Image (cartoon, grey):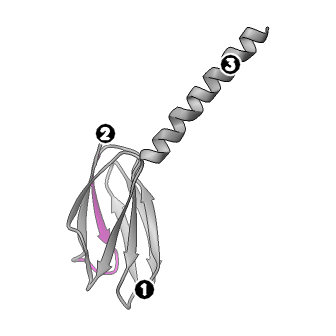
Amino acid sequence: MKLHNRLIGIITLSMTGIFASSAILAETVVVGQKDSAFTKKEITIKKGDTVDFLNEDSYFHNVFSLSDSKFFDLGSYPEGESRSVVFEEAGEVVVECAIHSDMRMVVKVTE
């Protein structure tokens, strides 16, 4: 019984380490919204990474995507605020602003 409990403890610690190292490897990329445009037209990130959309304009933006690999709507938010999205699936995600129709960027998510 002691050996069994010890093995369960070792497996649990190993799995915890795996999950912790995955979280440590994830990165956050900041993309600004300035002069009614995204500050980056295209970025490449890995699965699990976060993109933080920072509004640097004196007016509201609304960031969204209708892409199959990542569907989201961050709502409208003012200057100085940001909203974040975690990208869990590989693929190409087109990101737009519902308020400014010319605002568009691509997030390429790799394995």
Image quadrant where one finds the C terminus = top left
Local packing at callout 2 (Cα closer than 10 Å; few below 14, some 14-19, many 20+) is few
Is 35 included in the stretch rendered in magenta?
no
Q: Which residue is mark 2?
A: 111
Local packing at callout 3 (Cα closer than 10 Å; few below 14, some 14-19, many 20+) is few
Q: Which residue is mark 1?
A: 79
Q: What's drawn in magenta, residue-wise?
A: 91-101
| Marks 3, 2: nearer the viewer | 3
Q: Is residue 92 left or right of residue 80?
A: left
Residue at left offset 32%, top offset 75%: 32
Q: Are marks 1 and 3 in contact (CB under 8 Å)?
A: no
Q: Which residue is mark 3?
A: 8
Residue type at mark 2 is Glu
Residue at left offset 32%, top offset 78%: 33
Q: Secondary structure at mark 1?
A: loop
**Whole-Å distance between the Cαs marked 3 and 2?**
30 Å
**Whole-Å distance between the Cαs marked 2 and 1?**
33 Å
Q: Mark 2 or mark 1, which has the lower sequence index? A: 1
Residue 41, position as x, y percentages in the image: 20, 67
